[in-house]
Amino acid sequence: MRKVLITGAARGIGYELCKIALSDGARVYGSVRTQEDADRLHAEFGDDFTPLVFDIRDRDDVAEKLTQIDALDMLINNAGIIGPDDSDTTTASLEAFSDVFEINTFAPLQMAQLLLPKLKASDHPAILSISSQMSWMGYAKSDHISYRASKAALNKIMQGLATDLAQHEIPVCVVDPGWVRTDMGGEGADNDPLDVAKGIWQIAKGLTMSKSGKFIRWTGEERDY
Ligand SMILES: NC(=O)c1ccc[n+]([C@@H]2O[C@H](COP(=O)([O-])OP(=O)(O)OC[C@H]3O[C@@H](n4cnc5c(N)ncnc54)[C@H](OP(=O)(O)O)[C@@H]3O)[C@@H](O)[C@H]2O)c1
């Protein structure tokens, strides 16, 4: 049975990913921030789902909670925030910038570092991180600049992680989910979160070293960084 950790399980893409992974026979650890969400999801998903309660910014607590995981095949870094929408670079609050980077950029790296021993012991390991088309360097737009920058930095870190983990045959990739109808994406977004989760799960299950270091659309095609 494949063992998977998905961060940000309480709603949005992460919630749908948990559903899809469980329906495909995986054993799922899902990170949530409240005991209420932990109880809700456990009641809905059953005993193949183990909630882990932590805020991804609290590094010591994350490290402690991850000791509950005995073995792991796949890490899906999904939790994220959009941050301030008025983050014009000339006036942006560095505190707000820092918070967005803590959640979107540093936390996924910490998760990978902490879980590396378990992933090295897996026969079919994989690390996926949900990025965004807003990371693309071809856009000169500056709205949500902290979000754009945090995801561009996430891409670079995960590309480097792919390089460093090649010797251990652990594939690492980043995924562009498109624009998705969640609390973050809003009602007018293009894509249904369940469809996107199904696409991401197919990428996760089929991730091999030939795709490591790539930026992949939720529909499966490689795209430019
Ligand atoms: N929606 C889109 O159009 C879109 C487009 C491109 C990329 N993405 C990316 O896709 C991923 C999922 O987005 P979504 O649309 O599903 O967002 P969402 O509906 O807003 O859900 C975000 C999830 O992240 C969790 N989270 C936020 N801050 C956290 C923290 N400090 N510690 C732990 N968990 C935290 C939330 O937990 P709580 O429920 O406890 O708040 C929630 O489960 C994100 O990385 C996002 O950047 C989304």
Image (cartoon, rainbow, N blue to C red):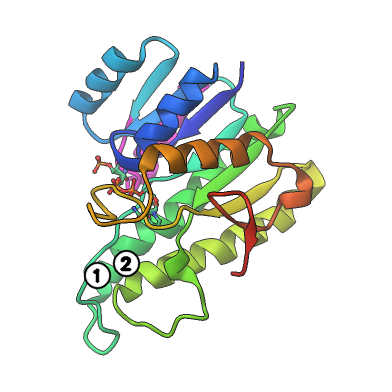
Secondary structure beneath disc 2?
Answer: helix
Residue named by callout 1? 95
- The quadrant the N terminus occupies is top right
Q: Quadrant of residue 223?
A: bottom right
The one nearer the camera, 95 or 197, is: 197
Q: Is residue 125 above or below residue 168?
A: above
- Residue at figure coordinates x 29%, y 21% from the top left: 41
The answer to whether the beta carbon of the residue marked 1 is less than 8 Å from any atom of ligand 1 is no
Could you tell me the amino acid type at mark 2? Ser
Residue 119: % across, % down: 65, 33
Within 10 angstroms of label 1, few (less than 14), some, or many (20 or more) residues? few
Answer left or right for 186 relative to 77: left
Tag 2–tag 1 contact (CB < 8 Å): yes
- Residue at figure coordinates x 36%, y 11% from the top left: 46
- Residue at figure coordinates x 78%, y 42% from the top left: 169
Identify the magenta region. Answer: 53-69
Residue 76: % across, % down: 51, 40
Answer left or right for 210 relative to 32: right
Residue named by callout 2? 98
Question: Can residue 63 be seen by looking at this rendering?
Answer: yes
- The quadrant the C terminus occupies is bottom right
Residue 52: % across, % down: 36, 27
The one nearer the camera, 102 or 189, is: 189
Residue 31: % across, % down: 36, 33
In the picture as drawn, the residue positioned furthest to the right comes out as: 167
Secondary structure beneath disc 1?
Answer: helix
Within 10 angstroms of label 2, few (less than 14), some, or many (20 or more) residues? some
Could you tell me the amino acid type at mark 1? Glu
In the picture as drawn, the residue positioned furthest to the bottom comes out as: 90
Answer left or right for 49 relative to 189: right
